[in-house]
């Protein structure tokens, strides 16, 4: 994919999301016993909004075609995400044959670990949330189309946005305290995905409304940065606040996605050009880095560099090597996966176009 064909604003958001998660898991900046970087892990929430926006646009556009099918939607999604995911599982297993760690259960192959127990490959919980969400998205959206009309999604999606929050409060009422892994449960943690799908709906079905959102989005931009700063030092927090965190993050990051979508970045210096290229590069590798960083970081930190005394120098080296291995994973696994999918789907699109053309047209092209 050419750099100039990408939306640089979304790449900025994607790069910020992975760097936030990466730094959160790789560095520990403690002041008075509190890790000030802990809330950078909310980059996962930004990933959810981005994912909902991008996949939602694909759904709303493709579902207008008479050739749309659930299988075509799922196939495109799975071809993009599953090969790197299963490759990351093999890497995890391979690495930990040499450096023993927690094993993975059979249900990792069915994306059930966020309910049955995450025993290793920690970041996989968020992939479960996404795979579950996109399994049901076209079914529920098509059902809404048939029963109430597509225009109803303009209002149904904002209502659905609050469902996970309501379910969290209901779960808290029934189970006190909440189950240990409640944060990973799909039905309790899909606020950001729904927010992203609503943005996608407006983008495709009512673009004028999407344009009008930019002004209120600008006023909501401080929400997420303020949460990142305040949450690590807000201790103890009331349980009700923990129930609201995902919803607040989803609103804040949805504002950032909407605002950054219109970003234009035309470098005028060599430094700006390199910075832009680096941003796009980090965005391209974000999925691979996310899949692998939790596997490589502890092994490099505790086994390979275990004799090196703990400190900022060691952490920076660990982060560099971990990120580099994620980039290599992208080059060897993820990028070929994307290329193979795009070639197949583009080939099918051309074949369908040829079939619709009058006899002789395709031969003359």
Image: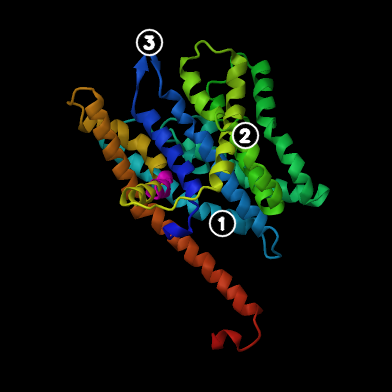
**For mark 1, does the 10 Å Cα neighbourhood hold few (<14), some (14 to 19), or many (20 or more) residues?**
some
Vertical relation: 207 (above or below) 113 = below
Crowding near the residue tagged with mark 3, few <14, some 14–19, many ≥20 C-alpha atoms within 10 Å: few
| Quarter in which the C terminus is drawn | bottom right
> Is tag 2's residue or tag 3's residue first in the polypeptide sequence?
3
User: For mark 1, what is the residue?
Assistant: 75
Q: Along the line of sight, which residue is nearer the eye, 346 or 28?
A: 28
Q: Quadrant of residue 68?
A: bottom right
Q: Main secondary structure of the magenta part?
A: helix
- Residue positioned 64% across, 39% down in the render: 215
Question: Where's residue 334, x and y in %?
Answer: 40, 53
- Disc 2 target residue: 191
Is 325 on the left or on the right of 237, as rendered? left
Front label number (2 vs 3): 3
Residue sitting farthest toward the right: 148
Question: How many labels, in total?
Answer: 3
Q: Residue at x 68, y 44 (%)?
A: 212
User: Helix, strand or loop at disc 3?
Assistant: loop
């Amino acid at each position: 994919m050419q750099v100039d064909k990408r939306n640089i604003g979304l790449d900025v958001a994607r790069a910020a999301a992975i760097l936030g998660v990466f730094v959160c898991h790789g560095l520990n900046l403690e002041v008075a016993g509190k890790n000030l970087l802990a809330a950078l892990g909310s980059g996962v929430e930004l990933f959810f909004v981005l994912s909902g926006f991008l996949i939602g646009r694909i759904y709303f556009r493709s579902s207008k075609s008479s050739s749309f099918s659930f299988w075509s939607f799922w196939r495109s999604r799975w071809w993009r995400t599953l090969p790197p995911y299963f490759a990351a599982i093999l890497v995890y297993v391979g690495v930990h044959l040499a450096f023993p760690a927690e094993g993975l259960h059979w249900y990792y192959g069915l994306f059930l670990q966020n309910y049955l127990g995450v025993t290793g490959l920690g970041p996989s919980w968020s992939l479960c949330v996404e795979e579950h969400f996109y399994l049901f998205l076209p079914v529920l959206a098509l059902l809404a189309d048939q029963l109430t009309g597509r225009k109803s999604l303009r209002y149904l999606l904002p209502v659905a946005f609050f469902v996970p929050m309501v379910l969290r409060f209901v779960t808290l009422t029934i189970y006190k305290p909440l189950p240990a892994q409640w944060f990973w449960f799909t039905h309790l943690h899909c606020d950001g995905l729904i927010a992203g799908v609503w943005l996608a709906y407006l983008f495709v079905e009512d673009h004028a409304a999407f344009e009008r959102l930019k002004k209120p989005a600008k006023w909501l931009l401080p929400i997420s940065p303020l949460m990142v700063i305040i949450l690590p030092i807000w201790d103890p927090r009331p349980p009700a606040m923990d129930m609201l965190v995902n919803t607040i993050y989803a609103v804040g990051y949805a504002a950032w996605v909407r605002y950054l979508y219109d970003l234009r970045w035309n470098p005028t210096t060599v430094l700006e050009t390199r910075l832009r290229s680096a941003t796009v590069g980090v965005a391209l590798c974000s999925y691979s880095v996310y899949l692998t960083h939790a596997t490589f970081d502890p092994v490099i930190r505790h086994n390979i560099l275990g004799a090196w005394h703990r400190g900022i120098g060691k952490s920076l080296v660990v982060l560099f090597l971990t990120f580099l291995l994620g980039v290599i994973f992208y080059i060897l696994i993820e990028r070929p996966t994307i290329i193979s999918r795009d070639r197949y789907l583009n080939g099918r699109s051309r074949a369908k176009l040829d079939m619709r053309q009058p006899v002789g047209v395709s031969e003359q092209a």
